[in-house]
Image (cartoon, grey):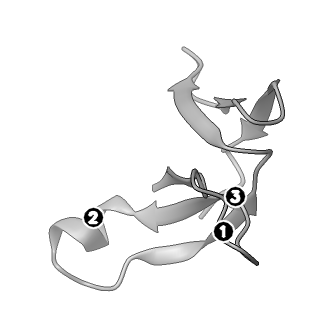
Amino acid sequence: MGLALVDSNRFGASGATSSLAVVDVPAVLEGKPALLGYLRAGGFPREMALEPDGRTLLVTDFGSQQLEAVGVTGLP
């Protein structure tokens, strides 16, 4: 099962964007390459929480002042 990590571009680096990186946790624990891909995110994603049913990840986007819901059941 994957895990989403936030790349917030907090300091607004030129040409950089905010995203969620999806990684394979078992691969990380084995010291293997683990990056599965990236998901687009709003401005300055900051906090994440998985809903109790485990199917939706809620992400607060501080810079764009929004809450996004990411379906995680289709992630690798």
Q: CA distance from mark 3 to mark 1?
A: 10 Å
Instruction: Please tell me how many numbered marks the rendered image carries.
Output: 3
Residue 25 on image: x %, y %: 33, 60
Q: Is residue 16 left or right of residue 67?
A: left
Mark 1, Cα crowd under 10 Å, few <14 / some 14-19 / many 20+, is some
Identify which amino acid the numbered label 1 is placed on.
Tyr
Q: With respect to residue 40, does 66 lie above or below?
A: above
Residue that carries the numbered disc 3 in the rendered image = 18
Name which residue lies at 70% across and 72% down: 16
Residue 6 on image: x %, y %: 53, 51
Label 2 secondary element? helix
* Residue farthest to the left, as pictured: 30
In this rendering, which labeled residue sits more in front, label 1 or label 2?
1
Corner quadrant of residue 69: top right
**Rendered image: mark on residue 26:** 2
Residue that carries the numbered disc 1 in the rendered image = 38
Name which residue lies at 72% across and 54% down: 74
**Rendered image: mark on residue 64:** none
Residue 50 on image: x %, y %: 54, 26
Q: CA distance from mark 2 to mark 3?
A: 25 Å
- 36 or 44: nearer the eye? 44
Q: CA distance from mark 1 to mark 2?
A: 18 Å
Q: With respect to residue 24, does 5 lie above or below?
A: above
In this rendering, which labeled residue sits more in front, label 3 or label 1?
3
Q: Is the Cβ of the residue at disc 1 closer than 8 Å to that at disc 2? A: no
Identify which amino acid the numbered label 2 is placed on.
Pro
Residue 73 on image: x %, y %: 67, 45
Q: Is the Cβ of the residue at disc 3 closer than 8 Å to that at disc 1? A: no
